[in-house]
Image (cartoon, rainbow, N blue to C red):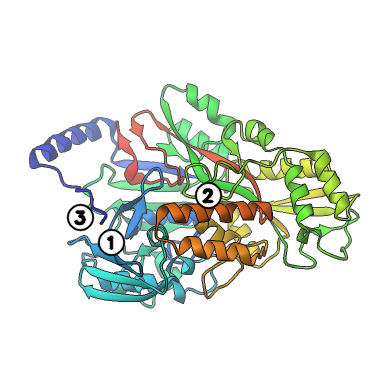
Amino acid sequence: MSKIVGSRISDHGSRIAAAALGGWLATAGAAELRIGLSADVTTMDPHFVAAQPNLTAQHHVFEPLLHVDERGRPVPVLATWRNPDPLTWEFTLRKGVKFHDGAELTTEDVAFSLERPFTIKGSPGGFTMYVRPIVAREIVDRYTIRLKTAAPYGAIPQDLAEVMIVSKRIAQGASSADFDSGKAAVGTGPYKLVRFARGSRIELARHDPYWGGKLPWDKVTLTILPSDPVRTAALLSGELDAIEHVPTADLARLKKNPNLRLAQAVSWRTIFLHVDQSRDRPPGVLSRAGKPLDRNPLKDVRVRRALSKAINRQAIAERVMEGLARPAASVVSPSVFGHDPALKPEPYDPDGAKKLLAEAGYPDGFGLTIATPNNRYINDEQVAQTVAQMLARVGIATKVEAMPLSVYFGRARNKEFGVALLGWGSLAADLALRSLAATANPDKGYGAWNWGGHSNPKLDQLVERSLGTVDPTQREALAREAAALAAAGVAFIPLHYQVVTWAMKNTLSYQARTDEFTFAHHFKPR
């Protein structure tokens, strides 16, 4: 059984820590922490869309039963867990955990929170995939709940790390607008929501009765600054104390600044291209003259492989990303469960790409448009533009359509793109494939983010077998087999794994996280 690490220290230690912190605050005025975020937060409803910018803000206000540490390993938050049998996961809550309104957290709140994602309508990518394997919720007592699955399912800890717990009394019947206004945004997290101004900032106040102990920052402001130069300038001017996703163009300058310090980690995030393999005439896939084609070339695996061969991943990593990337071969990065080091990035081979295009019946190529956000991932639009240039060299007349993330996800949901850039971070390869490459099946929670419409029954079976295995060694072997099959079928085109960087005043420290999350409560005074 997992164990909760105690968060209480001795009275003597508390007095020493309080005295030291009080002195630091008095001299440095650090009661307020100001952080620059790199992407827009679209809602404070923790069950509306499983997008990391939203989760970053929401994790300050709400908490899941468990989460992951800086290297992606599951750790207890609100509960410990065990497996009485292969079909049962028993969670025991911390006692005395308080919501922001003073009510105690109970298993009634947990059961409600695991059901609420099914009630959300209109989400471009919701949380039902994380809770669908649970077929029954049995409340044993105020602090114990048993979750039942229809078959053995080993990914419950990773899934529930994504699902926030809300107050049943307050959230029952609440809309996403109620969360955005603050009316329903009542969690157990370290901070209370003061104000959510979409596209501008999230203002937070410390929740003093927080079970994890009192934090140094009594006020936190998360400022939305998608523009890289603006975010860096705000840090250098002193308007911000820290920023996430340091732009590559500013990295060398910030490294040399004696008033700043950096924290870096290879991210769990894979940047890749979804290519539409399901429709006969996907948007933006045309002849070189801009006219409709008789058939969709992206349905042919040879064409998809040709596109992959035409991309020089090493050049993107070194030049466009200026070292803040590693060429990708698979759905998950090296630190993630199920990554297979035997899978190697597709070699850059433009002649081989041309040969495959000719074999598939496109010796003169065709035209396509790559859709991309321009304010979500590191150098996202530049990456897409570079890929377009590389494809043009093998005869694919390629355009780029870039837009803000707030517009991008809505259009993607409406299936307006034939080729689209996406970044995905996951705790395991089988979980990533379930969302990105498995045949869409809302009843099973599969394919929620499978924009390309890839479908391979063998892949679906491997993913299902992997997720249904509670033995970690067997599960990882199956996850690797599934990832290799997805690569062989070019379910999508991997580009690179991000290297993520935070910059902050040298009076602060932050443990770089492979999952890229930026948490105010993890910044420490030095």
| Mark 1 or 2: the one toward you | 1
Q: From the image, tell me which residue sits under label 1.
A: 82
Q: Amino acid at mark 1?
A: Arg
Question: Considering only order in the chain, which callout, 2 or 3, is on the residue closer to the N terminus?
Answer: 2
Q: Secondary structure at mark 3?
A: loop
Residue 33 image-quadrant placement: top left
In the rendered image, the quadrant that contains the C terminus is top left
Mark 3 and 2 residues: CB-CB less than 8 Å, in contact? no
Identify the residue at image location x=23%, y=69%. Answer: 144
Residue occupying the far left of the picture: 12
Residue 313 is situated, as x and y percent measured from the top left of the image, at 67, 38
| Residue to which mark 2 is pinned | 39
Left or right, residue 16 beside residue 464: left
User: Which SS class for mark 1?
Assistant: strand
Q: Amino acid at mark 2?
A: Ala
What's the CA distance linking mark 1 and mark 3?
28 Å
Kindly tell me whether residue 240 is visible in this rendering.
no
Q: CA distance from mark 3 to mark 2?
A: 30 Å
Q: Earlier in the sequence, mark 1 or mark 3?
A: 1
Secondary structure state at the residue bearing disc 2: loop
- Mark 3: few/some/many CA within 10 Å (<14, 14-19, 20+): some
| Pointer 1 with pointer 2, Cβ within 8 A | no
